[in-house]
């Protein structure tokens, strides 16, 4: 397969660092990879007042400023929101949209609308924090995002994470799934994923697809990067 260009969008609380092991493996296989950090999720940037549209704008600006063409746009977890919004504005530059254990947004539904328990926790957090962010408790990472991993790895990942801008989680997109505008798509689902707001098969069904099962849990891009890179290459 000729070299492909992958643009990697991280999930909530994460930055480009979460995709670095996969990006390294993709490059070792002759492909290009650009991992993004969204506004408010790097030290020295402020999360206050950020809206979902800011995350979408950032993905679009990164692709356009680099003049990337024929890209495979990949998202993880919550990153399905900015990736979907950006895909609608980058149709001429995209060869495929790949969701990896990600939310496939429904038109008009934000992250708070996908799961009643998650939604209430998000709203409570936004209301309680001065900058209206959503921090992730360590126990939520241990029990949900990375169950069964070593405490040392869990602690490391926890200390790399930053609070998620609240607007990213409460606001919605006013666009349909990407397959409804003619973009090719794929849905990869971690075999042991316990963290999605609803079953991954339901998100895949919004694209008219069945999920392709890949090794690992919700954060397998860190624990099984070679497997995730291989799955992305196959999906592209």
Image (tube, helix red, strand yellow):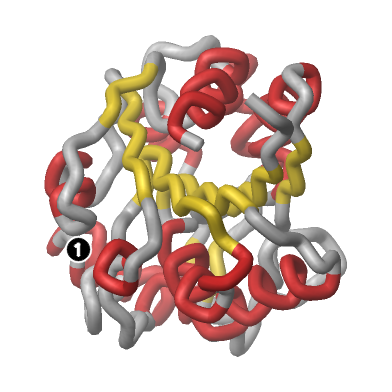
**Which quadrant, please, contains the N terminus?**
top right
Residue 114 to residue 28: above or below: below
Kindly state the secondary structure of the residue where label 1 is placed.
loop
Can you see residue 220?
A: no
Instruction: Measuring from the top left, give residue 161's x and y in whole percent.
Output: 64, 46
Q: Quadrant of residue 223?
A: top right
Q: Residue at coordinates 48% horizontally, 57% vertically from top-left? A: 79
In this rendered view, identify the residue nearer to me: 163 or 80: 80
Front residue of this view, candidates 81 and 176: 176
94 relative to 158, above or below? below
Image side of residue 63 versus residue 167, left or right: right
> Which residue is depicted at the point 65% across and 38% down?
18
- Badge 1 is on which residue? 114
Percent coordinates x, y for residue 182 in the rendering: 33, 67
| Residue 112 horizontal/vertical position (percent) | 27, 70
Residue situated in front as seen by the camera: 179 or 224: 179
Classify 151 as above or below 80.
above
The location of residue 54, given as percent across then percent down, is 61, 82
When asked about the image quadrant of residue 200, the answer is: top left
Q: Residue at x 15, y 40 (%)?
A: 201
13 relative to 232, above or below: below
């Amino acid at each position: 397969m000729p070299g492909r260009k992958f643009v990697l969008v991280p999930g909530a609380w994460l930055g480009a660092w979460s995709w670095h092991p996969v990006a390294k493996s993709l490059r070792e296989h002759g492909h290009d990879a650009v991992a993004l950090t969204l506004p408010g999720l790097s030290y020295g940037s402020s999360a206050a007042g950020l809206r979902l549209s800011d995350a979408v704008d950032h993905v679009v600006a990164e692709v356009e400023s680099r003049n990337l063409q024929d890209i495979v746009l990949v998202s993880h977890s919550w990153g399905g929101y900015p990736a979907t919004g950006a895909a609608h504005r980058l149709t001429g530059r995209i060869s495929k949209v790949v969701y990896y254990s990600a939310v496939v947004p429904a038109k008009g539904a934000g992250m708070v609308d996908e799961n009643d328990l998650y939604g209430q926790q998000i709203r409570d957090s936004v209301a309680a924090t001065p900058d209206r962010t959503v921090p992730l408790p360590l126990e939520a990472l241990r029990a949900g995002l990375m169950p069964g991993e070593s405490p040392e790895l869990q602690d490391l990942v926890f200390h790399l994470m930053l609070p998620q801008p609240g607007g990213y989680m409460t606001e919605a997109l006013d666009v349909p799934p990407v397959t409804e505008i003619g973009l090719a798509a794929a849905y990869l689902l971690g075999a042991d994923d316990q963290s999605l707001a609803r079953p991954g098969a339901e998100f895949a069904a919004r694209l008219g697809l069945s999920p392709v099962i890949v090794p690992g849990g919700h954060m397998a891009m860190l624990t099984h990067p070679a497997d995730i890179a291989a799955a992305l290459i196959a999906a592209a």
